[in-house]
Amino acid sequence: MKYWYPQEIWYENEVELHHLGREILNKMALLQIPLKPIAAHNKARLEINDPQKRFIASKRVLILGTKKDLKLIPCLPSADYRIVIGTSCPAFCEYCYLSDSLGERVFPRVYVNLDEILNPVLSLLKKERKKTVSFELSSSGDPLATEHLTGLLGKTIAILGQEPNTQLRVVTKYDHVEPLLLLAHNQKTFFRFSLNTEYVITNFEHGTSSLKERISAAEKLAQSGYPLGVIIAPIILYKNWENDYFDLVKYLADKLPFLQELELITFRFSKRSKSKILTRFPNSKLPFPQSGIRHKAFGKYVYDEDSMNRIQTFFSAIIAKYFPHSKIAYFI
Ligand code: SF4
């Protein structure tokens, strides 16, 4: 897939105080991408009234900021804590897991104060010397999407690669892994590719790498010694779902038989995310069933118990058959 380049860079003044910030700004200037100073990354707005046009235009801007809240926050079920080096990404997945939390602030953002962000992480690792502590890097965006512009992910991998008692967990729908292949990761970074059937990727994950590109990127990372897993998400019940997901798992077994873990996440939505999706993608083919779903807390809907049991039984059987040595990390 082609690299993404923003049409504009917006940056907080503080960015210039950081070496990495100056480095990225210089690179953007060389690429002749217009630069615009802003007061605060989380207050940025585009003066466009039409919500669909505003959404599309927001994804053409890259914001450089600094992360102010540096507290470590738990990140279950995927890791002990999260590390936030960026927010959102340039892609247009209809069911983006961030649509509830980001609201209108969907701009891809990266934070250049990496040393400050990693300070509490390194202190905790020092304190917990005898325990492995895991950190999720993708809880607020896709860190590979802008890596060719910032180098932030590579720096994080190299720094945590020196820590004996950690696991850094990364999820991506992109395939631009080349800058990561020669890093001293020391197998401390556990990469997971977020995958789905061809039907789901083509219809709902606009602007991301194709299934084949993601698998080929996973093969390259495996050759470079990175431990690997996949996330199959969101699992959607549609007409041919069983055949298509069966083909996907079989294809994975052929290409990536060494996968250590599979994480399984079923389709879920809230009233708020459904309304956002239908505003941003008025012709969406996403099935929002009226029946066969159950209400969870905070306006969230998931498949009902019968459907969940059916999905779990189906995946447990094919994963046991094709990945007898891998584990299902969780099913939700
Ligand atoms: S790749 Fe991830 S962060 Fe980006 S739009 Fe899709 S779901 Fe959201």
Image (cartoon, helix red, strand yellow):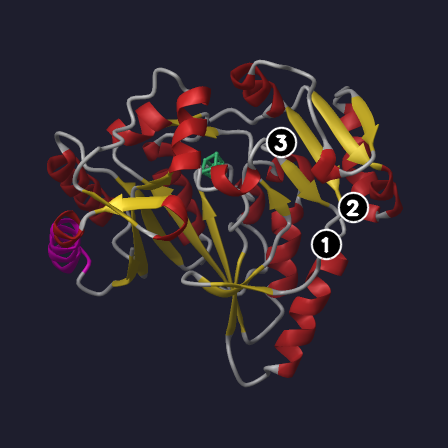
Q: Secondary structure at mark 3?
A: loop
Left or right position of 273 against 50: left
Label 2 sits on residue: 20
229 within the magenta span: no
Label 1 sits on residue: 114
Left or right position of 201 against 253: right
Determine the image quadrant of residue 13: top right
Left or right position of 18 against 108: right
Q: Secondary structure at mark 2?
A: helix
Mark 1 touching mark 2, by CB under 8 A? yes
Task: Give the mark nearer the N terminus: 1 vs 2.
Answer: 2
Q: Residue at x 38, y 56 (%)?
A: 228
User: Which quadrant, please, contains the C terminus?
Assistant: bottom left
The Cα–Cα distance between marks 1 and 2, rounded to whole angstroms, is 8 Å
User: Total number of numbered labels?
Assistant: 3
The kind of residue tagged 3 is Phe
What residue range appears in magenta? Answer: 310-323
Numbered badge on residue 107: 3
Q: Residue at x 38, y 31 (%)?
A: 274
Q: Residue at x 44, y 53 (%)?
A: 191
